[in-house]
Image (tube, coloured by chain):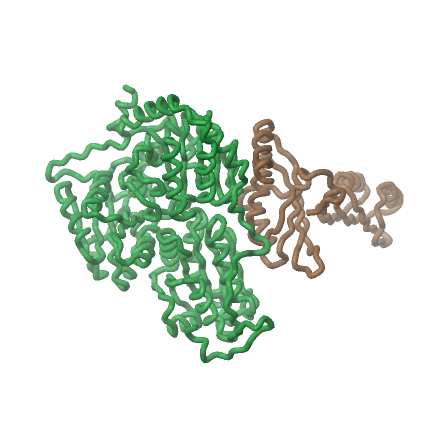
Amino acid sequence: MTNAEHKKSGSDETGQTVHTMTGAEVLLQVLADLGVEVIFGYPGGAVLPIYDAIFQQDKIRHILTRHEQAAVHAAEAYARSTGKIGVALVTSGPGATNTVTGLVDALMDSIPIVCISGQVFSSLIGNDAFQEADTVGITRAATKFNYLVKDKEKLADKIREAFYIAGSGRPGPVLVDIPKDLQLAQVPYVKKEIKSHPSYKPVTEPHHQAIKDAVTAMKKAKRPIFYTGGGIINAGPHASEGLRKLVKLSGFPCTSTLMGLGAYPASDKQFLGMLGMHGTYEANLATHGCDVLIALGARFDDRVTGSVKDFSPNALKIHADIDPSQINKIVLVDIPVIGDVARIIELMIQEWEAQSDHSVDQEALKNWWEQIEKWRAVDCLKYQQDTKAGEVIKPQHAIRRLSELVKEKSKEAYVSTEVGQHQMWTAQYFPFESPNHFMTSGGLGTMGYGLPAAVGIQVAHPDALVIDIAGEASTMMNIQELATIKQYRLPVKIFILNNRYMGMVRQWQELIHGGRYSESYSESLPDFVKLAESFGLKGMRARTIDELDTMINAMLDEPGPVVMEIQVEREENCFPMIPAGAPHNQILLGPVKEKTKTAS
Amino acid sequence: MDYIDKKTLQRSAQQEKDEFIKAIFSLIVENESGVLSRVIGLFAGRGYNIESLTVAPVDDHGRKSRINILTSGTPMVINQIKEQLNKQIPVYQVVNLCQQGPYVARELALIKVVSKGSERAEALNLADAFRAQVVDASVDSLVFELTGKTEKIDAFVDLLRPLGLVELSRTGIAAIGRGCQTI
């Protein structure tokens, strides 16, 4: 208890000590009880009492971002890279409305965060007061749950409940709106925990018959595939370990969504790479041609399925998810398994071993792998990089070299990305070996996510190598966070692939809109090196292929933060690509590979 | 349990993929501000249809409310509506009465008729036949109260239209399962 000793104390009917403190002090005490170490936030009128309480304690560290959206993204990445719950603190009105993008981002990607927003005095609510906004109304569809605390007696419990809801079941963002008068009021505080809720009871233990049916189907498979998603990462390291074991035990191939990368090691032979719109040729054709599809913690997003009616048309589908509403939402499945995916995998392994008298048709599996190896031999990620001095850098090559040089230094990087081509190239060319190392905005596709996310990761892992792989357009969306990086001396490496286009928009305009590049060029860009210097950061630049390795090494060797601009091929497209709404077997390969495909 | 329900859905959804079915969802929810907005927002945000909606507190202490929603959609959509409602934190329970078994669904209507002479007499005769109550009367006007199935109210209203019907207020349906079963 930091501030409470000198406060009034008494005891309640159960003999528990009741301390009376201000609402703001209760908030910080409860956060400390819940194990919160860091808050990302931005002060303002309606949270001044909370900031005053922050000033007078030393358990919780506050990181001042330069925009409330960035505070939420930083909290998201903090959560995703640690498995803890991220916390953001913002003021009323514009402070709260600025969080909306971050909250929806967390909702789409199932990231557990709690956002505390200040609200105007209770007596002013509804009067269009200064900096008043209907925060719970605005964020209702942006959160897993939200509420306005009206009763000061309930303040502590509502905060505890918010953490329970955010972190349990399918994780997500929870917002608690606290009027300023409650922050100032004398509020009772009793130390306790909340681990249940009267009307919210997530199912974590799967139906055992479902596990049995799933494993029986898996054993009968001739052309099986695992399709794994972000749920595995949310379920914790135990789920990733289990997945590795299950994939090895079965001998089946494994593909992953964008959000699931790292759950299964990219370097393993049984891993086929990412599936979906920019997934690998082998992953997509295997998903299309499989006879048993085992979806674990994935939700059949349209960027994964393409044309729903043609998605994995002949497969028996097993779908494991903690959220019952995901089952049969997009694709009808044969065997639904509802529960915590870590537990599901654990039970699947047990059941696999229990059904030892039924073994997989090894001959069929061997044929399936032969087919997959033929698809893999197409080498769909091949690109042509001219290595003569002075040649233009291919963006794919920049990312590949980045990953290779990181590995040469025996480091494992935490990577965040912005959204667009560079994000897809990162998924394709930067192999992730362990979970919680890849932070990206998958569901919402939020440009401007990567830089504040890198802040959140570096705060959580002060000694780790953190790289934001960015595009020049996305990174401009939250560029103000360079100041946060400077203030807290966060040694983040911002690796900007500059093609002077909103690359993915330009690519679609080239392929789908007749090459009419409407508003997709990055005009009037800053000089990124000078920009970095103006924030007191190190700026670097690579213009041609001969400078690439040197500059990457210089960046990695620099102990402090670096803004690195890599000038890349302007009109490079991201392939493979399944055009929106097309089936997986109509995958387009890049200009280098298109010939090979027709030949095979 | 859920596992069997979902497997059943898989089969029925394949058979009648695009056919619309009716559903009456009865929800027990926390009686706090914002819950109704959450439920309605869900329907609006996900493009589900609301044909009628009723809500009122139902327990002794006013802590829980019951919401009845009449809707329709393909079996896949109806299943989604149920799961999405269930996912809302302040929702205790969601039951699709149409799926659960036999049920009773009733609606109340207040109907104002302004007419004289034979039209007024005819309106009163019809009210008698439909067992509607006269709850307000003036020289030129009548207000009928009628409780019953939606179809019965529709029929009564249609008959009154040429007889001076000027205003209509309907509650939407309240519904409950038949027999001992409760939600």
The chain painted brown is B
Image coordinates of residue B114 in percent, x first then y, are 81, 48
Does A437 sit above or below residue A485?
A: above
Image coordinates of residue A548 in percent, x first then y, are 16, 44
Taking the image as shown, residue A494 lies to the left or right of residue A279, namely: left
Q: Quadrant of the C terminus of chain A?
A: top left
Q: Quadrant of the N terminus of chain A?
A: bottom left
Does A299 sit above or below residue A367?
A: below
Q: Residue furthest left?
A: A389
Towards the viewer: B133 or A591: A591
Residue at left offset 69%, top offset 61%: B61
Towards the viewer: A349 or B139: A349
- Total marks shown come to 0
Image coordinates of residue A378 in percent, x first then y, are 28, 26
Taking the image as shown, residue A549 lies to the left or right of residue B120, namely: left
Image coordinates of residue A209 in percent, x first then y, are 54, 36
Taking the image as shown, residue A242 lies to the left or right of residue A390, namely: right
Towards the viewer: A409 or A131: A409
Residue at left offset 61%, top offset 51%: B92
When asked about the image quadrant of residue B128, the answer is top right
Please identify which colour was used for chain A in the image. Answer: green
